[in-house]
Image (cartoon, rainbow, N blue to C red):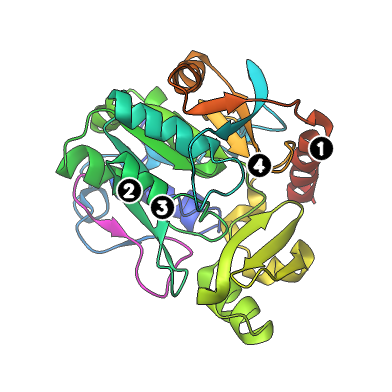
Amino acid sequence: MEMKTFKDLKSEVWDTELCSGCGACVAVCPADALRFEPGNTDTPVNIGYCKAENDGVPCGACYAACPRVDLAAQGKMLGPYEDIVAARAVFPVERKQSGGAVTAILVNALDEGLIDAVVTVTRDPWTMKPSSAVITSSEELVQHAGSRYSWWVPLLASLKEAVVTRKYRRVAVVGVPCVARATQAIRASDHELLRPYAKAIRLVIGLFCTETFDYAKLVEGKLQSEKKIEPWEIRHLDIKGKLDVYLQDERHISIPLAELEESVRPGCRVCNDFTAVNADVSAGAVGSPDGYTTLVIRNDIGRGFVDRAVWQGKLATGSAVDLPVIEQLAARKAQRRQE
């Protein structure tokens, strides 16, 4: 079978508005030919160095890593799992999103040397603009705790910095379902150019996600211009069937997701995966009581990292999970994407 290349990725995914913006293609391109340009967040662009397009040299790394080239392989509903538990961090996590369980798992993994870097998302506290980052200390991880996945950022673009530039060999990735799907594609691929990334990725934590939003349309448009909320006033955002905005002065407003439809990234409209079924562990606030995070432990890798965090006294598991409410949201997303 002829190798699929950048040209196929562009025609099949970019030109058809299927791109999730995960950044996997940007990370694995050996020529650094792909990037997201300021003002164009829908798809990356080829800045002129792609050998497949310019010289006909076969590569195909970008295509092999893309989570959207095979939509039929997308996970649905809850996906495979070994256990579902409610969990919380035992130590203080000031900016935690729910129970701080993801932070606790990663802090323990860093402290024990199970991983040496985390590819995740940070944000500017004044503008709320997100950026992908490589974090290597538990102190820095706690400082940046809290979800920034309510709007889009090409998270996996920092995977190249972690693996190639800084040569970390035990990397954890935290991201939404398309990111988890891309890491699964990288891990499963026999493509030679993806092998260093596959070997380096030790843990993938997927986050429950209904959709992601364009920063300019959500923050600058809906929140700042329409709702008169400045970015620096926002303590954190949460999505549980609606967008909840929690402000520094303890005020709280809720916005129905139907009002945010124009802010949704085009590529999110084809995704039917709510629970990040391709992750080792999936996490979200839905299904657990206040102060806890729902953890979906999917395989032995995820089980090992969770158990080590519990053993070391950094993570506690507790009350029962409301499975029907998770299934309801997963079904709602799957149905919405079929309409």
Q: Which mark is residue 140?
A: 2
Which of label 1 and label 2 is nearer to you? 2
Disc 1, SS: helix
**What residue sits right under mark 4 in the picture?**
291
Which of label 3 and label 1 is nearer to you? 3
Q: Which residue is drawn at 36% across and 54% down?
A: 132
Quote the CA–CA distance across marks 2 and 4: 22 Å
Q: Can the viewer see residue 155?
A: no
Q: Horizontal placement of 120 versus 287: left or right? A: left
Q: Position of residue 248 (x, y in %)?
A: 59, 70
Q: Residue 144 carries which label?
A: 3
Tell me the magenta residue range. 28-43
Mark before the other along the chain sequence, 4 or 1: 4
Residue flagged by tag 1: what amino acid is it?
Val
Residue 185 position (above or below residue 271): above
**What residue sits right under mark 1 in the picture?**
325
**Label 3–label 2 contact, CB within 8 A:** yes
